[in-house]
Image (tube, helix red, strand yellow):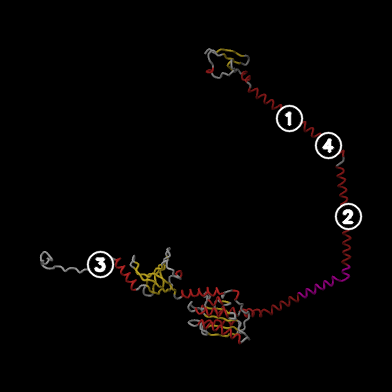
């Protein structure tokens, strides 16, 4: 078979044949990238900071996980049973476990979150809440078990760092308000690994020191440190410290951080102070207030002595008056005066009784005069005469009214009488047979007999037309 001609001119290949190439669509490329990522990377753990958090009404949560150099899109579907999902927030540092994949609609790789672990302050906060709930359930926070602080402590135990600012604040306040207060320092670390164990051990040592040195005994324990972040104060949130405070036979005052800082130790302690200085003021309040009381005692005592002397003087005066009133001559005079009063009252009663009787007789006489028969008969006659006159007057008026009404009716009947109409020149024509009044000529018929009544007499006639 002859060689196939490559062109019609047999001049050889003028243009080189293009090499075969594979062209992918965007969807195919994205699918390959997705398959490669899921196969090569798959399920991983990744850490970073949450930003651009967006929770949809469907329950899905979309956010970005970033660090200093890059960022990663993440999605947490509502069907995933992930603890702490409600704690996700912008700025939260988290550790995520999930599957790396590609969201094909946007060609964007993302992480489908399967597990969330909070880091930094968030993790500490969760641990804080869990321990708080546990200890509260055991009754470590009950108000009934908290003890009152002694009003005048002579010796206290101080648990803090010997180099911190808290000890300086406490000593400054104590020196100013109660310099006689004895302080037993139990130094320990208040921050970092092992600090919680040292704080708990210091509490136990002070309880043992109280047993070994009963006079003067330690009246209370102050556990304190200055302010700081949650991580700095974490030693006071450890369970070992809480249980040491709870088991202490000595009342415990907790003053950790600033006013807004709360620790587990604050909830267990018998008294919580906002700051170390505030704790020192609470401890020395009794002595400090008593100092003012002692300064004012002299004036108060003098005032009370004066009041007592005044009361005794008044009692003496009243006793003197009572003795004077009890003298026999005075009692005799009082009896004589009472006799005079009784005599005067008796005379007044007799006169009053006489006037009362006279008034009664006068009233009876007047009543008897009013009921004499002659006067009563005369009164009855006058009444009868008056009634008769009134009856006659009413009869006359009645007859007069009846005659007037009768005249009025007679006049009205006379005006309405047909005879009165006829007297003015009118006549009435009726059917002679039936007596029906003829009011229209159309009612008369030829040959009909009619009767016409005049003022005087009647006319009988026959209709012709």
Q: Is residue 434 visible?
A: yes
Q: Is residue 351 magenta?
A: no
Residue under label 3: 23
Q: Which residues are magenta?
A: 311-332
What is the x, y in percent for residue 88?
Answer: 44, 70
Mark in the foreground, 2 or 4: 4
What is the x, y in percent for residue 385?
Answer: 81, 34
- Above or below — where is 456 with respect to 115? above
Instruction: Tell me the quarter of the picture where residue 326 sits.
Output: bottom right
Q: In the rendered view of the protein, which quadrant contains the N terminus?
A: bottom left
**Left-right relation of 82 to 266:** left
What is the x, y in percent for residue 186?
Answer: 55, 85
**Left-right relation of 165 to 318:** left
Gap in angstroms between the C-alphas marked 4 and 3: 148 Å
Res. 54 mark: none
Instruction: Tell me the quarter of the picture where residue 402 sits.
Output: top right
Q: Earlier in the sequence, mark 3 or mark 1?
A: 3
The answer to whether mark 2 and mark 4 are in CB contact below 8 A is no
Residue under label 1: 398
Residue under label 4: 380
| Residue at 63% from the left image edge and 14% from the top image edge | 457
What is the x, y in percent for residue 31?
Answer: 31, 67
Main SS class of the magenta portion in the image: helix
Q: Earlier in the sequence, mark 2 or mark 4?
A: 2
């Amino acid at each position: 078979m002859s060689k196939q001609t490559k062109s019609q001119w047999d001049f050889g290949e003028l243009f080189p044949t293009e090499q075969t190439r594979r062209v992918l669509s965007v969807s195919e490329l994205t699918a390959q990238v997705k398959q490669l990522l899921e196969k090569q990377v798959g399920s991983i753990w990744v850490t970073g900071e949450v930003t651009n958090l967006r929770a949809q009404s469907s329950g899905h949560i979309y956010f970005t996980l970033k660090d200093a150099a890059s960022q990663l899109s993440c999605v947490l579907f509502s069907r995933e049973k992930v603890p702490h999902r409600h704690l996700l927030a912008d700025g939260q540092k988290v550790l995520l476990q999930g599957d790396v994949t590609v969201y094909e609609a946007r060609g964007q790789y993302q992480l489908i979150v399967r597990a969330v672990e909070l880091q930094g302050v968030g993790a500490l906060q969760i641990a804080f809440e869990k321990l708080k709930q546990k200890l509260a359930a055991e009754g470590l926070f009950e108000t009934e078990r908290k003890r009152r602080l002694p009003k005048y402590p002579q010796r206290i135990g101080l648990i803090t760092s010997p180099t911190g600012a808290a000890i300086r604040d406490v000593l400054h306040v104590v020196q100013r308000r109660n310099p006689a207060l004895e302080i037993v320092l139990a130094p320990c670390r208040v921050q970092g690994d092992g600090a919680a164990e040292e704080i708990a051990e210091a509490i136990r040592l002070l309880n043992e020191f109280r047993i070994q040195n009963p006079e003067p005994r330690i009246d209370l324990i102050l556990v304190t440190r200055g302010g700081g972040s949650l991580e700095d104060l974490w030693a006071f949130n450890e369970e070992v410290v809480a249980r040491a405070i709870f088991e202490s036979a000595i009342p415990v005052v907790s003053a950790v951080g600033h006013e807004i800082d709360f620790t587990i130790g604050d909830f267990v302690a018998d008294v919580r102070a906002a700051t170390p200085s505030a704790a020192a003021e609470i401890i020395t309040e009794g002595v400090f207030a008593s100092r003012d009381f002692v300064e004012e005692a002299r004036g108060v005592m003098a005032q009370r002595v004066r009041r007592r002397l005044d009361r005794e003087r008044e009692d003496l005066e009243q006793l003197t008056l009572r003795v004077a009133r009890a003298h026999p001559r005075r009692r005799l005079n009082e009896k004589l005066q009472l006799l005079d009063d009784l005599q005067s009252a008796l005379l007044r009663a007799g006169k009053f009784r006489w006037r009362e009787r006279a008034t009664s007789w006068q009233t009876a006489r007047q009543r008897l005069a009013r009921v004499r028969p002659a006067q009563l008969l005369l009164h009855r006659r006058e009444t009868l005469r008056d009634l008769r006159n009134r009856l006659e007057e009413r009869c006359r008026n009645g007859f007069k009214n009846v005659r007037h009404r009768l005249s009025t009716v007679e006049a009205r009947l006379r005006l309405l009488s047909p005879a009165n109409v006829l007297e003015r020149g009118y006549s009435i024509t009726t059917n002679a047979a039936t007596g029906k009044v003829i009011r229209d000529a159309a009612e008369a018929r030829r040959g009909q007999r009619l009767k016409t009544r005049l003022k005087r007499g009647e006319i009988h006639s026959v209709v012709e037309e």
